[in-house]
Amino acid sequence: MAILKKIGIIFLRISISIILLIFLFKQVDVKSLLDIVKKADKSLLFFSFFTSFFIYFFCFFRWKMLLNAVGIRLPLSRLLSPFAGGIFFNLFFPSTIGGDFVRSADLAMHTKKTKEVVATVLLDRLSGYIGLVAVALLAFLWGRKLIQEKIIMQSLFALTVLTGVLIFILLILFNGSIYSKINKLLHSPNGGKLRTTIESIHQEMHYFRKHKKIIFNNLLLSFIIQALSPLSGYIISLSLGLKLNIAYFFIFLPIIGAVTLLPISVGGLGLRDALTIYFFTKVGISKDLSFAMSLLGFFFIAVYAGIGGLIYVFTLHHRRV
């Protein structure tokens, strides 16, 4: 029954993505959409694609930094395989949970250090969220006068919720007092396994408190990564001939990215496009152009995911050895 339930949930998320895409394609002129993509400046698109490469490049070394801190020192080629597999599975699983599970399971089986590996993946993900919130808040302060009052309130609400959830998670993992209170709530007949898992991860997280320099460098990388993503989107808009203020991308795209992390659709497909159209039409961009921006951004993600899948498959033999 549990397997059937999981299959049903995945099928539901796939259905949501498909329904959203069908709805969006009905809202735009498909011929106009194709013309927009065909006329895009190919050199600028390549530049945007190359910018996206640095996002994955920095993500890889951010994770490697954490692994080194817990004593897991492996050749780059061995770490590249689970990382690439994570990128590939992120495309098909809801949010980024699937990709994180793949790279955790792959490396844990190889190193036999499950708790340490899971802790690095979790902290890697959390530092990414911190970078996202930092970029979004700074961009909001920078460009709040550029957007209408209604959009300001909606953006501020989304950022407030995201920041609140992030602070709550960090307090549970790093604050001993808060953690103890949460742990007491888990002392129930059904809380044993969950309590044990949280205790193990909490202990590993506390280990990182001794490595403040690593944490600082990790957060700095996260900030750079989250700043590169809106920059890539801005370059895509330039390739389509748009002359928007770059502040819009630094305000809207982190919010869109945060919402698509929710396990609603598969890989954010459909949901990301709908949000892009919603926000950018509010600042005067047509639905066709907004949809084209989103689809080109997803195409880059899909290409890198495909490359990651190939790396993961072709290194299967080495992982078994």
Image: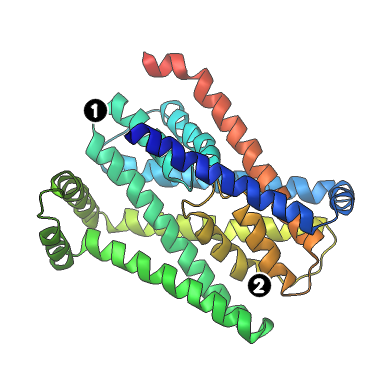
Q: Nearer the viewer, residue 307 or 224?
A: 307
* Residue 112, disc: 1
Task: Give x and y (percent) for residue 67.
Answer: 32, 40
Determine whether 140 is above or below 135 in the image. below
- Residue ID at (86%, 48%): 34
- Residue ID at (68%, 82%): 146
- Which residue type carries mark 2? Ala
Task: Give x and y (percent) for residue 3.
Answer: 36, 32
Disc 1, SS: loop
* Residue 122, disc: none
Q: Quadrant of residue 277 in the image?
A: bottom right
The residue pinned by badge 2 equals 247
Check disc 2: other Cα within 10 Å, few if <14, some if 14-19, many if 20+.
many
Determine whether 260 is above or below 251 in the image. above
- Which residue type carries mark 1? Lys
Task: Give x and y (percent) for residue 107.
Answer: 34, 30
Q: Is residue 168 left or right of residue 137?
A: left
Determine whether 74 is above or below 28 in the image. above
